[in-house]
Amino acid sequence: MRKWLKYILFFGLMAGSPVLHAQEKHEGQEDPKQKAAEKKKQEQQDELRAAEEKGRKRHLKMQDKETRKRMKKNKKRSKQINENKRDPFYVRWYKKVFKKQRNV
């Protein structure tokens, strides 16, 4: 009887020990230094995104009208391809006809 009592007590303490942490932080508590570091990192990422967007707009502005149209068309086609979307049915139906007209 005593042997069983020892085993039950031992396993009971082992099972309960991970739950009993002395200095566990609550979810609402965060380290101020860590919070400041995360905020700084987020601001840097925002600045980087803004700089990239500004660079893209500047690059697009430097192109002539025909090139901008071609870039827009290629961007649209690449987006469709990446999303695994097919051409609309009317384009697929008359694709051969359009190719023949261009070659003539």
Image (cartoon, helix red, strand yellow):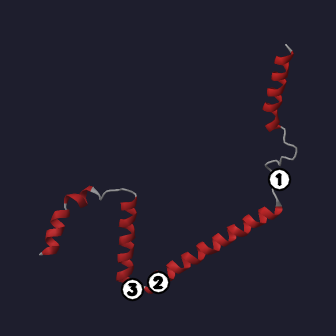
Q: What distance separates the C-alpha of mark 1 from that of mark 3?
A: 55 Å
Counting other residues with Cα less than 10 Å from the Cα at mark 1, is it few (<14), some (14-19), or many (20 or more)? few
- Tell me: 77 left or right of 5: left
For the C terminus, the image quarter is bottom left
Q: Position of residue 10 (x, y in %)?
A: 83, 27
Q: Residue at x 54, y 75 (%)?
A: 53
Q: Position of residue 8 (x, y in %)?
A: 81, 22
Residue picked out by circle 2? 61
Task: State the image quarter where residue 91 is shown.
Answer: bottom left
* Of labels 1 and 3, the one closer to you: 1
For the N terminus, the image quarter is top right
Nearer the observer, 34 or 98: 34
- Tell me: 48 left or right of 40: left
**Amino acid type indicated by mark 3:** Asp
**Amino acid type indicated by mark 1:** Gln
Q: Is residue 39 above or below residue 104?
A: above
Q: Residue at x 45, y 81 (%)?
A: 60
Q: What distance separates the C-alpha of mark 2 from that of mark 3?
A: 8 Å
- For this orientation, the residue located farthest to the top is 1
Q: Position of residue 34 (x, y in %)?
A: 78, 62
Dot 3: element:
loop
Q: Residue at x 87, y 47 (%)?
A: 23
Residue 12 numbered mark, or none: none
**Amino acid type indicated by mark 2:** Lys
Dot 2: element:
helix
Residue picked out by circle 3? 64
Residue picked out by circle 1? 29
- Tell me: 64 left or right of 92: right
- For this orientation, the residue located farthest to the front is 3
Counting other residues with Cα less than 10 Å from the Cα at mark 3, is it few (<14), some (14-19), or many (20 or more)? few
